Image (cartoon, grey):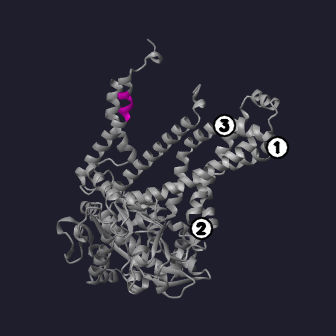
């Protein structure tokens, strides 16, 4: 009997502990410990570099914080961990921010708009020169990723729809190998795979993200609750980003060394990394980022993105329309349900950086 | 009384057997309620109503885009692959296992190689399979076959060699040929064992199937789980996991009843 009672009492606790998701976290008066997750991508390499070279610690000390930066080998896992509450901030795209944490009820703020893809994502056809020839082919891509969005936009541009192709979900590490098998004739993926596949003799890039500039945005997003508890966390993130980004683009030996290090860390070299950087519109100047995020175009982009997500059923099975998740834009404009704002774009911290107020 | 002599009655045994299931359900409900109280949109441990709505959507509502019933389409795709994989593996194992079990020359030829191959981790071969056989059905079925055939062969070989020597000698004295002995003495006695081995390999077969579907596919149970994993859609993943488990249990029961029906004499002494 005691055994049974013991089992009844401890099992739920064990289950919760095993998943590492204790529902209630003890919170200090003002939090000073924060955890940041990032994954390998050209526009996010500065975070790893900043952690390695002590830039993170320097900015954390300045605000009296402790910031732990963790690299994930699996992008989706890093977002899932953030959504589950194990991390306070994560690197992700505008689309994934809306469909994973925001649709999962985790109020998320885009602290930094780091870059947008201007060629890093591409539609590649085998033995075909024009996008129209994609009709009727099976397209290998990571379903529901920005690649899928890019495909939808590409098809739209030539008056086709997803009904005209069939989509095959394929894991991103296998893209390069898959393209070389005879059955694969169309693919949508991102760098560094795009560069490797494009180098194959029969591969042609027929559509790329530079043709929809500013729609695939790479962010450093933090939980709104964490930022409210201690806004210095947002300031530190901005400080880290702009110091590292400036170093990354600088035409100095230090800049070259930083690019070489980031290239090596992402499995290529300095030249390969600089080629990827060329296909990225990096916001190393905070004023540009502020201008981008406050421009009315962002509302149009997010409206398209949420329409795509709703169409694919990714805003939840019960979503009646794309309005279910509210998106707040700088200046107080809200797309969707104002009572359920879960994704916020703000120029607050980037503006501070632009004004030298960090 | 010693603890080893306390035997539960029928009713007690039933209650005890259900207890772990009940504990799991209670733990889930408590965890789900706690997390949902904090964040009503939490995706990790969805409420029962969410699960029910999701199951309804997956199993009983046609998909908006394709018009398919997702759960059934996925199940059909996965079970087809599984059937091919298990079927090919069982046939190969029967032929090779019997050959090696009956003929010492064949045993000398095959046993070391099969023992060696059975130690290759099949999942490590997956990238090679995909390059060699493409991303289609062939590579997925091949992974299942590669994963379970060596073990089936070894098991059949052991069963065949463990048959009482006297039985073979007796057949010889009755002037049976090697072929006849294989067919009439050994085969009937290894068949029940093949079915049992196959039952034990259902778990690994599902593992290989799901691993292959996770990497590249456009339908299948593993495909769906790894697809929605991107969206932390536990309301899809939990029902799929439960469904896969149920399918495996049913398959196990079906094979078990097949064995009993086809080889009732093998039940003696079980």
> Is residue A324 left or right of A188 when viewed as pictured?
left
Query: Measured along the vertical axis of the image, is residue A120 above or below residue B53?
Result: below
Find residue B236 and report its horizontal and vertical position in percent: 36, 56
> Quick one: B144 or A270, which is closer to the camera?
B144
Badge 3: few (under 14), some or many (20 or more) residues near its Cα, within 10 Å? few
Quadrant containing the C terminus of chain B is top right
| Labels 3 and 1 within one chain | yes
Find residue A186 and report its horizontal and vertical position in percent: 52, 77
Query: In which chain is the residue bearing label 3?
Result: B
Q: Which residues are magenta?
A: B14-20
Answer whether residue B18 is magenta in the image: yes
Residue displayed at 53% across by 40% down? B258
SS under mark 2 = loop
Answer whether residue A300 is magenta in the image: no
Q: CA distance from mark 2 to mark 1?
A: 36 Å
Q: Which residue is mark 1?
A: B105
Query: In which chain is the residue bearing label 1?
Result: B
SS under mark 3 = helix
Residue displayed at 20% across by 65% down? A340
Mark 2 or mark 3: whose residue is earlier in sequence: 2
Query: In which chain is the residue bearing label 2?
Result: B
Q: Which residue is mark 2?
A: B134
| Labels 2 and 1 within one chain | yes
Q: CA distance from mark 3 to mark 1?
A: 22 Å
> Quick one: A277 or B79, which is closer to the camera?
B79
Residue B67: tell me if it is visible. Answer: yes
Label total for image:
3
Q: Report the disc number at residue B188.
A: 3
Asked which quadrant contains residue B98, the reply is top right
Q: Are marks 3 and 1 in contact (CB under 8 Å)?
A: no
Find residue B150 and report its horizontal and vertical position in percent: 66, 47
């Amino acid at each position: 009997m005691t055994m049974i009672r013991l089992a009844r009492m401890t099992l739920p606790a064990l289950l919760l502990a095993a998943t590492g998701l204790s529902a209630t976290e003890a919170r200090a008066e003002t939090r000073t410990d924060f955890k940041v997750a990032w994954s390998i991508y050209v526009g996010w390499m500065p975070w790893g570099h900043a952690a390695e070279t002590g830039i993170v610690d320097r900015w954390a000390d300045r605000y009296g914080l402790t910031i732990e930066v963790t690299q994930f080998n699996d992008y989706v896992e890093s977002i899932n961990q953030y959504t589950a509450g194990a991390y306070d901030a994560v690197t992700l795209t505008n689309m994934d921010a809306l469909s994973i944490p925001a649709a999962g009820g985790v109020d998320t703020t885009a602290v930094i708009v780091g870059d947008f893809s201007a060629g890093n994502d591409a539609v590649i056809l085998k033995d075909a020169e024009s996008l129209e020839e994609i009709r009727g082919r099976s397209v290998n891509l990571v379903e529901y990723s920005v690649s899928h969005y890019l495909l939808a936009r590409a098809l739209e541009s030539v008056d086709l729809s997803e009904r005209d192709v069939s989509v095959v979900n394929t894991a991103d590490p296998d893209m390069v190998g898959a393209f070389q098998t005879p059955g694969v004739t169309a693919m949508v993926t991102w760098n560094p795979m795009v560069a490797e596949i494009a180098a194959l003799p029969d591969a042609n890039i027929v559509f790329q993200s530079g043709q929809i500039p500013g729609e695939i945005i790479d962010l450093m997003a933090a939980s709104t609750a964490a930022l409210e508890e201690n806004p210095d966390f947002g300031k530190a993130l901005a400080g880290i980003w702009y110091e590292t980004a400036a170093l990354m683009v600088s035409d100095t030996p230090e800049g070259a060394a930083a690019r070489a290090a980031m290239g090596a860390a992402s499995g290529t070299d300095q030249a390969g990394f600089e080629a990827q950087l060329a296909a990225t519109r990096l916001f190393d100047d905070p004023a540009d980022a502020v201008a981008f995020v406050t421009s009315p175009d962002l509302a149009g982009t997010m409206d398209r993105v949420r329409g795509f997500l709703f169409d694919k059923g990714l805003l939840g099975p019960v979503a009646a329309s794309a309005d279910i998740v509210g998106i707040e834009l700088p200046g107080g404009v809200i797309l969707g349900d104002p009572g359920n704002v879960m994704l916020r774009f703000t120029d607050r911290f980037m503006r501070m950086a632009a004004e030298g107020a960090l | 009384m010693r603890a080893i002599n306390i035997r539960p009655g029928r009713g007690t045994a039933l209650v005890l057997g259900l207890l772990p299931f009940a504990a799991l359900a209670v733990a889930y409900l408590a965890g789900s309620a706690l997390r949902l109280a904090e964040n009503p949109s939490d995706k990790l441990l969805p409420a029962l109503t969410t699960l029910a709505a999701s199951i309804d959507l997956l199993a009983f509502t046609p998909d908006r885009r394709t018009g398919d019933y997702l759960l059934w389409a996925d199940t059909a795709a996965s079970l087809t692959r599984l059937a091919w994989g298990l079927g090919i593996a069982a046939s190969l194992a029967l032929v090779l296992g019997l050959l090696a079990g009956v003929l010492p020359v064949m045993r000398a030829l095959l046993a070391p190689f099969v023992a060696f191959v059975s130690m290759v981790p099949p999942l490590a071969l997956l990238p090679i399979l995909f390059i060699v056989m493409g991303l289609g059905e062939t590579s997925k079925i091949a992974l299942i076959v590669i994963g379970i055939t060596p073990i089936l062969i070894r098991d059949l070989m052991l069963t065949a060699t463990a048959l009482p020597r006297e039985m073979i000698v007796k057949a010889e004295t009755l002037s049976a040929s090697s072929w006849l002995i294989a067919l009439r003495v050994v085969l009937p006695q290894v068949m029940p064992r093949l079915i049992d081995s196959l039952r034990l390999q259902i778990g690994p077969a599902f593992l290989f199937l799901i691993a292959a579907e996770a990497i590249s596919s456009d339908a299948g149970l593993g495909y769906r789980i790894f697809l929605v994993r991107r969206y932390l859609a536990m309301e899809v993943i939990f029902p799929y996991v439960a469904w896969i488990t149920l399918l495996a249990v049913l398959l196990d029961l079906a094979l078990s009843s097949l064995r009993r029906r086809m080889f009732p004499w093998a039940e003696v002494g079980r």
